[in-house]
Image (cartoon, rainbow, N blue to C red):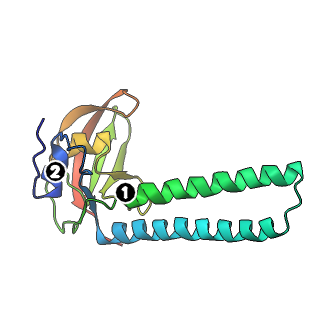
Amino acid sequence: MKHIQKNTPNEAIYETQTMPATKARLLYFSQNGYNNHVRRIQEADAEIARIKSGTNDAHESEGGSQEESAIHVNINDAIVSYENISRTLNKELENFKIIQYPTSVDSVCVGCIAKIRVDNNKETQCYIVGYGENGNYKNSIKYDAPIAKALMKQKPGFKGGFNTEDDKYRTVELLGVSPIKEK
């Protein structure tokens, strides 16, 4: 399948795309989400530096016991873990676009609150957000999550279904939509 670049985030995420192996898929951030994302990279990098500076002090007073050896392994595991976090977050910034959330909406899009009913259960609302924002709002869902993809561009009254990431089929009904007021 050929990759077709769309101009708006809602068009870009509504369609299934296949990206060339050499180019990362386009990710959408609000300015706030981008700032959060960069902050998390800085925090991971600072933690790597902190741990490494602590291990340099430990190497200077190295005693060689089994306990110290186990601590050294745990420290190395922590460094590798933070390096993986930093690398993953940096990779997500290889191809991105900062978008503004809409001030009015009539259908589901990035930057909206969707009032929904899943599997005929009680009503709930979810915030359809860009990258870097999924912790900023209670019940936030990244725009590329299966439920968000099912709802994208839909208007209140829509009833449909989607497969979860673990391949469980769920039904969803869209009861209302409104814009997110950015924090």
Q: Earlier in the sequence, mark 1 or mark 2?
A: 2
Which callout, 1 or 2, points to the residue nearer the camera? 1
Residue, x 33% and y 52% (percent of image)?
A: 142
Q: Percent from the top left, x then y, of residue 117?
A: 32, 40
Residue carrying label 1: 91
Residue carrying label 2: 12
Q: Residues within 10 Å of mark 2 (few under 14, many from 20)?
A: some
Q: CA distance from mark 1 to mark 2?
A: 19 Å
Q: Percent from the top left, x then y, of residue 136?
A: 42, 63
Residue, x 17% and y 45% (percent of image)?
A: 14
Q: Could you tell me if residue 160 is visible in this image?
A: yes
Q: Secondary structure at mark 2?
A: helix
Q: Percent from the top left, x then y, of residue 63?
A: 89, 60
Q: Where the C terminus falls, by quadrant? A: bottom left
Tell whether label 2 touches label 1 (CB within 8 Å): no
For the residue marked with disc 2, what is the amino acid?
Ala
Q: Percent from the top left, x then y, of residue 131?
A: 34, 58
Q: Could you tell me if residue 138 is visible in this image?
A: no
Residue, x 51% and y 53% (percent of image)?
A: 84
Query: Quadrant of the rendered structure where residue 121 is?
Result: top left
Q: Nearer the viewer, residue 149 or 60?
A: 60
For the residue marked with disc 1, what is the amino acid?
Lys
Residue, x 67% and y 54% (percent of image)?
A: 76
Q: Residues within 10 Å of mark 1 (few under 14, many from 20)?
A: few
Q: Nearer the viewer, residue 45 or 115?
A: 45
